[in-house]
Image (cartoon, rainbow, N blue to C red):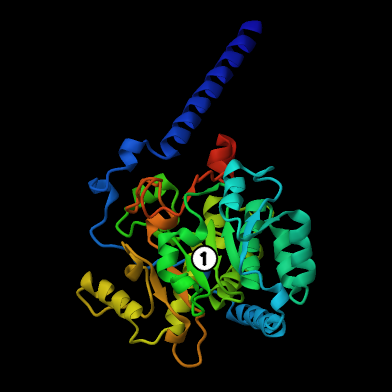
């Protein structure tokens, strides 16, 4: 009996060992590849023959347009009511957010950011201020507070907060792991587009950078890099020279709508947020889609951005182009700021104006998308890409199981 028990225990140990080895193999195969594999842009397995300039988010397959219209109208009502209150305009404020669960104290980068931009008012948003803003300042839209409270992690609340703050107050937002390579006003791309003649361009309400610009990336490369899509605007740094940007209003609507959709479709065993959920519901995915869709909705069909989108699609199709709006094509490989001013919108539409900076202004220091190192002459900020919210950067258990 003892021998049988011992043998059974031995077999169980072998099974556990085999399971552990298989788990480690899965983890190492799933983790991002080495620099030597990720870096080459000529690797056949990493490049497709045709670029993908258009991404269809699953959250836009069946959107609740009635719900989104109600939210948009409610936000617009706040804009009209508060628009005359100049004391709430904070377009000269540098905002950063520090909520529990992500970072517990300001980094040296954050302190340097404040020092290098001493002419800007500095505001570190923490839990008490954030909840007062959500519950009281925006109390006319209780849906914002309901969905804000529904988020399981600070990263989701921080994403929504940055959009709401810049929409409501205006100003410059930067993550806490962003280092100031230059002061904001000395950034070459911003000098060329926003701060001309020592005056802020009144026809621009939002400035964004480029984080990912790899329209030829293969599915394997996307898996290795943990990308939800082949292109995307930056939202770890943003600048709203004016408050109440129509672009940010649509971003907020989309985030709330996608959050509600996620909650409605979830069960108690599937209600969490994995890495891709976060990117698409509150992060760069929804941010990018909303901006491109606002451009598509507000610009006339003869506008250069729409024409470039149609032409880029037609180049790789034997049949007539199917593109009906602005895609990523006009932003691929830009080397200088690309701006669309508010008055360029068609009659009856409100764009607010957008400037997109080339990748090396805010997205330098990466190993893709034509990004150069932190010391490139175009560099205005350096992002450390800590990504501490990502499950696979916290523990292998969270990477495997969410």
Q: Can you identify the residue that label 1 sits on?
A: 287
Give the residue furthest to the bottom: 347
Q: Position of residue 176 (x, y in %)?
A: 60, 49
Q: Residue at x 40, y 44 (%)?
A: 224
Q: Position of residue 10 (x, y in %)?
A: 57, 14
Which quadrant does the N terminus fall into? top right
Number of labelled discs? 1
Q: Residue at x 58, y 60 (%)?
A: 173
Q: Residue at x 61, y 6 (%)?
A: 3
Q: Position of residue 268 (x, y in %)?
A: 69, 54
Q: Position of residue 365 (x, y in %)?
A: 40, 46
Compared to residue 137, the image places residue 230 above or below, namely above
Q: Nearer the viewer, residue 238 or 325?
A: 238
Q: Quadrant of residue 150?
A: bottom right
Give the residue furthest to the left: 318
Q: Residue at x 33, y 70 (%)?
A: 330
Compared to residue 194, the image places residue 210 above or below, namely above
Compared to residue 373, the image places residue 28 above or below, namely above
Q: Is residue 197 visible?
A: yes
- Say whether residue 198 is left or right of residue 221: right
Q: Is residue 269 visible?
A: no
Which quadrant does the C terminus fall into? top right
Q: Residues within 10 Å of mark 1 (few under 14, many from 20)?
A: many
- Say whether residue 17 is left or right of residue 93: left
- Say whether residue 136 is left or right of residue 203: right
């Amino acid at each position: 009996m003892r021998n049988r028990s011992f043998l059974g225990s031995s077999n169980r140990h072998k099974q556990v060992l085999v399971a552990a080895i298989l788990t480690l193999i899965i983890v190492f195969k799933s983790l991002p590849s080495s620099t030597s594999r990720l870096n080459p842009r000529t690797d056949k397995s990493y490049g497709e023959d045709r670029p993908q300039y258009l991404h269809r988010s699953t959250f836009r397959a069946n959107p609740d347009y009635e719900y989104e219209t109600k939210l948009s109208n409610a936000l617009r009502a706040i804009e009209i009511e508060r628009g005359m209150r100049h004391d709430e305009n904070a377009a000269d404020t540098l905002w950063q957010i520090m909520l529990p669960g992500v970072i517990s104290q300001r980094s040296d980068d954050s302190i340097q950011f404040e020092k290098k931009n001493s002419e800007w008012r500095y505001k570190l948003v923490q839990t008490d201020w954030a909840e007062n803003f959500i519950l009281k300042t925006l109390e006319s839209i209780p849906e914002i507070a309901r969905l804000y409270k529904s988020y399981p992690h600070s990263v989701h609340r921080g994403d929504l907060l940055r959009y709401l703050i810049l929409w409501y107050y205006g100003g410059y937002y930067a993550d806490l792991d962003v280092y100031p390579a230059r002061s904001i006003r000395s950034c070459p791309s911003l000098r060329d587009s926003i701060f001309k003649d020592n005056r802020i361009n009144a026809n621009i309400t939002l400035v964004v950078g480029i984080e990912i610009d790899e329209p030829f990336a293969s599915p394997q490369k996307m898996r290795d890099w943990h990308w939800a899509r082949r292109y995307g605007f930056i939202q770890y740094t943003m600048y709203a020279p004016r408050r109440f940007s129509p672009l940010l209003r649509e971003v907020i609507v989309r985030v709330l709508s996608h959050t509600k959709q996620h909650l409605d479709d979830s069960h108690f065993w599937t209600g969490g947020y994995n890495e891709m959920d976060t990117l698409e519901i509150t992060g760069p995915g929804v941010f990018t889609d909303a901006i491109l869709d606002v451009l598509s909705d507000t610009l006339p069909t003869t506008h250069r951005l729409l024409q470039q989108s149609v032409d880029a699609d037609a180049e790789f199709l034997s049949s007539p182009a199917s593109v009906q709006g602005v895609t990523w094509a006009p932003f691929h490989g830009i080397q200088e700021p690309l701006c669309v001013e508010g008055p360029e919108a068609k009659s009856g539409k409100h764009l607010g104006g957008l400037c997109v900076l080339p990748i090396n202004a805010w997205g330098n220091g990466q190993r893709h998308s034509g990004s150069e190192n932190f010391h490139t002459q175009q560099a205005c900020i350096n992002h450390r890409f800590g990504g501490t919210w990502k499950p696979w950067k916290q523990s292998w258990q969270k990477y495997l199981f969410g």
